């Protein structure tokens, strides 16, 4: 009998965070699967914002090319008056608890979009809701990214970043504060859908040390298991810092590009540096062949 050693879990090229045009990415789930595969990704998750309508197509496309797929979602949460993103991995996309929760969030997005357009109109830009909607593929998911694309293409700003800095970001004149899901609800929906909950890009939040500690503890107490350590949304110096946080709180570590599109993302699918070897990768808690073969 030939002995084939199990693959070293750290040598797996995993990308567990990206967006299709079912939320605010530019590619279809099928195009993303092909791109991930071409870039050498071996374990791939689609994590659209507040929506799982792309999961079936992603799974089918991944299966055809022999790419191991994990169903995912990125849930918007409000914690201590800031927006936090919680990724769910390995979710059952037919879970009614998850579907019902996400559907309410998308209704809130529709309402917010109208208010953003009103503020942009006060800033002198008419027709921005209609403009944003021309970039929306999935009518039930409107994002600030769609407004940013419209403002950019209409020549109102020179870059997408400027659209966020001047208008759409939380310091911008068209910012509309929104009450997203509670942390407890988001983790609960993910767990009810048999998923693993992951705090996305913790380096992006502007919390005090005390607030971060409260976030990590509450998340862990509710059954959250992982944080993103190596993500396209972190600066390199944050890789080390959040590796340290994962050790400190006993979190599993996740990795992902947060890819939205070649023009808009600094990091392509599959291009993020592997996780430190002493951390346990989040796929140890997922039902994937790399771990359980
Ligand atoms: P939303 O969930 O609709 O509030 O939109 C948030 C999305 O906007 C994020 O997922 C990013 O894709 C994008 N985004 C947020 N801030 C920025 C920024 N400063 N520059 C570019 N994109 C951003
Ligand atoms: Mn996004
Ligand atoms: Mn995010
Ligand atoms: Mn994301």
Image (cartoon, rainbow, N blue to C red):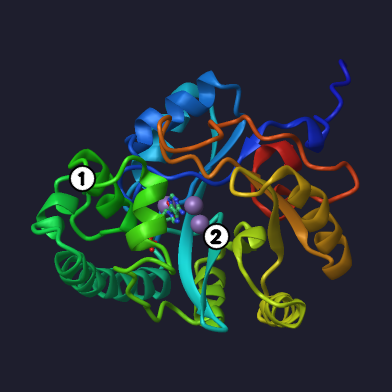
Q: Quadrant of the N terminus?
A: top right
Tell me which residue sits at (66%, 74%) in the image.
Answer: 207
Position of residue 10 relative to residue 186, above or below, is above
Image-based side of 265 in relation to 60, left or right: right
Near-viewer residue (185 or 80): 80
Point out the image quarter for the C terminus.
top right
Can you tell which mark lies on residue 170?
A: none
Q: Is residue 199 visible?
A: yes
Q: Where, by quadrant of the figure, is residue 27 drawn?
A: top left
Would you name the residue on which mark 1 appears? 135
Is residue 51 among the parts visible in the rendering? no
Instruction: Give the residue drawn at x 64%, y 43%.
Output: 288
Q: Quote the CA–CA distance across marks 1 and 2.
A: 24 Å
Position of residue 133 relative to residue 5, above or below, is: below
* Left or right: 85 as drawn, with respect to 125: right
How crowded pointer 1 is (Cα within 10 Å; few <14, some 14-19, many 20+) is rated as many
- Foreground residue among 122 and 198: 122
Of residue 239 and residue 270, the one placed in the foreground of this image is: 239
On the image, which quarter does residue 79 sit in?
Answer: bottom right
Above or below — where is 255 with respect to 31?
below
Percent x, y of residue 74? 48, 59
Disc 2 crowd, CA 10 A, few/some/many (<14, 14-19, 20+):
many
**Which one is closest to the eye, mark 1 or mark 2?**
1
Q: Secondary structure at mark 2?
A: strand
Whether ligand 4 has any atom under 8 Å from the Cβ at mark 2 is answered as: yes
Residue most extreme to the top: 2
Q: Which residue is mark 2?
A: 87
Q: Nearer the viewer, residue 66 or 198?
A: 198
Q: Earlier in the sequence, mark 1 or mark 2?
A: 2
The spot of residue 113 in percent (x, y) is 22, 67
């Amino acid at each position: 009998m030939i002995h084939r050693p199990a693959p070293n879990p750290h040598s797996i090229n995993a990308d567990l965070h990206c967006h299709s045009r079912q939320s605010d990415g530019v590619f279809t789930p099928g195009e993303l699967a092909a791109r991930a595969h071409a870039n050498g990704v071996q374990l791939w998750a689609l994590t659209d914002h507040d929506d799982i309508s792309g999961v079936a197509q992603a799974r089918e496309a991944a299966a055809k090319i022999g790419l191991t797929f994990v169903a995912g979602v990125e849930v918007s949460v409000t914690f201590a008056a800031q927006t936090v993103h919680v990724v769910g991995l390995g979710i059952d996309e037919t879970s009614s608890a998850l579907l019902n929760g996400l559907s309410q969030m998308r209704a809130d997005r529709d309402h917010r979009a109208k208010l953003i357009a009103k503020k942009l109109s006060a800033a002198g830009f008419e027709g921005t809701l209609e403009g944003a909607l021309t970039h929306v593929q999935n009518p039930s998911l409107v994002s600030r990214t769609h407004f940013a694309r419209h403002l950019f293409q209409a020549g109102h700003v020179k870059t997408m970043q400027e659209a966020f800095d001047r208008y759409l970001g939380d310091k911008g004149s068209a910012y509309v504060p929104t009450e997203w899901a509670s942390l407890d609800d988001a983790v609960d929906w993910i767990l009810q859908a048999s998923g693993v909950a992951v705090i996305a890009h913790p380096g992006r939040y502007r919390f005090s040390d005390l607030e971060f500690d409260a976030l990590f503890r509450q998340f862990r107490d509710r059954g959250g298991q992982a944080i993103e350590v190596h993500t396209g949304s972190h600066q390199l110096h944050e890789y080390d810092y959040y590796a340290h946080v994962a050790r400190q709180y006993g979190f599993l570590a996740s990795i992902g590009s947060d890819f939205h599109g070649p023009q808009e993302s600094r990091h392509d699918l599959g291009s993020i540096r592997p996780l430190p070897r002493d951390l346990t990768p989040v796929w140890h808690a997922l039902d994937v062949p790399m771990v359980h073969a």
